[in-house]
Image (cartoon, grey):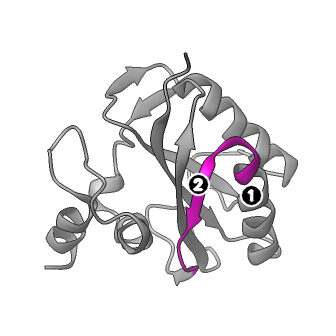
Amino acid sequence: MDRITSVAIALGSNLGDRRAHFDYALSRLGSILRNIRASTFFDTDPVDVPGRQPLFLNAAAVGETALSPDELLEALLEIEQERGRERPMPGAARTLDLDLVLFGNRILDEPGLVVPHPRFRSRRFVLEPLAEIAPDMVDPVTGKTVGELLRLVTG
């Protein structure tokens, strides 16, 4: 029997029609996640990127999957590619960025896949939309809920 796991995914975009990229991503995510819920879309300033870049649109989605972490990551990368994602350098502007933030209570550190996402605890642009839809989701590393982590970042 497949094990169903709750997952959290962060969405980001700062190139092209950002809302269309999100609408597409959420539609595709709806085909691989059950009970998907998405946050409000937030405009945010670029953080940890080289040079000057356009504003980001950020959001979060949560749902349930029977996929393995590797299978889900592969699906996220495929959706990014379908929207023209290019990776010329780290932090480059992007049409669509889908980050696997939480995968149930799993802690993974493998080449190409670190879960929970290593920087999500300090990123308001991830925590704010995620707290809107899943404030009680727990970070298995710290034991804190998403809502608690957001309060730590916002003071």
So how many labels did they put on this image? 2
Residue visible at 84% across and 55% down in the picture? 83
The residue tagged 2 is 35
Callout 2 secondary element = strand
23 with respect to 142 (left or right): right
The location of residue 20, given as percent across then percent down, is 82, 72
Residue 50 found in image quarter: bottom right
Residue 51, position as x, y percentages in the image: 56, 68
Q: Would you say 60 lies left or right of 53 here?
A: left
Q: Which image quadrant is residue 1 in?
A: top right
Residue at 15%, 44% in the rendered image: 142
Q: Is residue 109 left or right of residue 95?
A: left
Give, as a single range, the part of the protein colored magenta. 30-41
Give the residue type that dot 1 points to: Ala
Place residue 61 in its image quadrant. bottom right
* Between 60 and 67, the one nearer to me in the picture: 67
Could you tell me if residue 52 is visible in this image? no
Whether residue 33 is in magenta: the answer is: yes
Is 23 located above or below residue 80 in the figure?
A: below
Closer to the chain start, of discs 1 and 2, is 1
Residue 129 magenta-highlighted: no
The residue drawn where x is 31% and y is 28% is 107
Q: Residue 114, image x and y in percent?
A: 41, 31
Looking at the image, residue 122 lies above or below residue 1: below
Q: Distance between the residues labelled 1 and 2?
A: 15 Å
Which residue is the extreme one toward the front? 1
The image shows residue 103, relative to residue 54, as above or below, that is above
Marking on residue 25: 1
Please state which amino acid type lies under the numbered disc 2.
Answer: Asn
Query: Furthest-bottom residue in view?
Result: 43
Q: Nearer the viewer, residue 108 or 88?
A: 108
Which type of secondary structure does the marked residue at label 1 adopt?
helix
